[in-house]
């Protein structure tokens, strides 16, 4: 890997670690974002200089999050991983789901006895409004990413 590639992979790992995810998972994503096509677990482990077991565990986690796709080839027992074509839409959709779940929690909070206090009720109202604006913006982002991509696929 080139120096700038290595720096990006490491920064991606540290970003994930700061978000509470394993650093190796972030490093795998960083590497895969820089890779055209697919890599085997062995190739990922070699490039990142980590154990194959660690790569396997973290790649499965990334797959369950929808950030990586596992694929196979007829006659080859190895698992291959790649970045899904719709990664951008998947990431935005994940954020949108989190916002919706938080909004449900805020709605419950607004129904508590403590929320009969005007200041607390106002706090919930503002948070719900902010979350609503964020959800609207992300829904628009999904439409602008997914629809143009599908239109391009239909033209091809």
Image: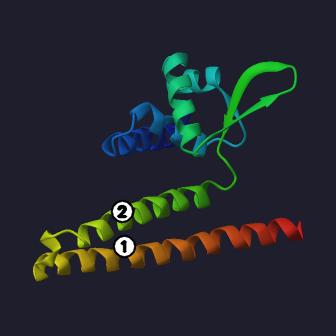
Quadrant housing the N terminus: top right
Residue at image mark 1:
131
Asked if residue 24 lies left or right of residue 126, the reply is right
Does residue 31 show up? Answer: no
Disc 2 is placed on an element classified as helix
For the point 52% across and 34% down, which residue is it?
Answer: 61
Residue 16 against residue 81 in the figure, above or below: below
Q: Position of residue 120 (x, y in %)?
A: 14, 75
Report, in whole angstroms, how far the alpha carbon at label 1 lies from the one at label 2. 8 Å
Q: Are marks 1 and 2 in contact (CB under 8 Å)?
A: yes
Residue mark closest to the camera, 1 vs 2: 2
Q: Residues within 10 Å of mark 1 (few under 14, many from 20)?
A: some
For the point 59% across and 69% down, which residue is it?
Answer: 142
Q: Residues within 10 Å of mark 2 (few under 14, many from 20)?
A: some
Residue 131 against residue 21 in the figure, above or below: below
Total marks shown come to 2
Q: Nearer the viewer, residue 80 or 11?
A: 80
Residue at image mark 2:
102
For the point 70% across and 25% down, which residue is it?
Answer: 79
Q: Position of residue 101 (x, y in %)?
A: 41, 60
Colour scheme of the rendered structure: rainbow
Disc 1 is placed on an element classified as helix
Asked if residue 69 lies left or right of residue 2, the reply is right
Quadrant housing the C terminus: bottom right
As drawn, the residue found furthest toward the front would be: 113
Q: Nearer the viewer, residue 114 or 136?
A: 114
* Pointer 1 or 2: first along the chain: 2
In which quadrant of the rendered view does residue 112 lie? bottom left
Q: Position of residue 28 (x, y in %)?
A: 52, 35
């Amino acid at each position: 890997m080139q120096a700038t590639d290595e720096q990006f992979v490491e920064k991606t790992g540290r970003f994930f670690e700061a978000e509470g995810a394993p650093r190796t998972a972030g490093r795998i994503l960083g590497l895969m974002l820089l890779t055209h096509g697919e890599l085997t677990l062995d190739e990922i482990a070699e490039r990142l200089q980590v154990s194959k077991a660690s790569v396997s565990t973290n790649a499965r986690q990334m797959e369950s999050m929808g950030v990586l796709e596992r694929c196979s080839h007829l006659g080859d027992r190895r698992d291959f991983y790649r970045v899904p074509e719709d990664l951008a839409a998947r990431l935005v959709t994940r954020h949108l789901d989190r916002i919706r779940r938080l909004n449900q929690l805020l709605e419950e909070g607004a129904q508590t006895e403590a929320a009969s206090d005007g200041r607390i009720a106002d706090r919930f109202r503002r948070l719900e409004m902010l979350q609503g604006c964020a959800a609207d913006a992300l829904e628009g982002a999904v439409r602008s990413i997914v629809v143009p991509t599908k239109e391009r696929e239909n033209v091809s």
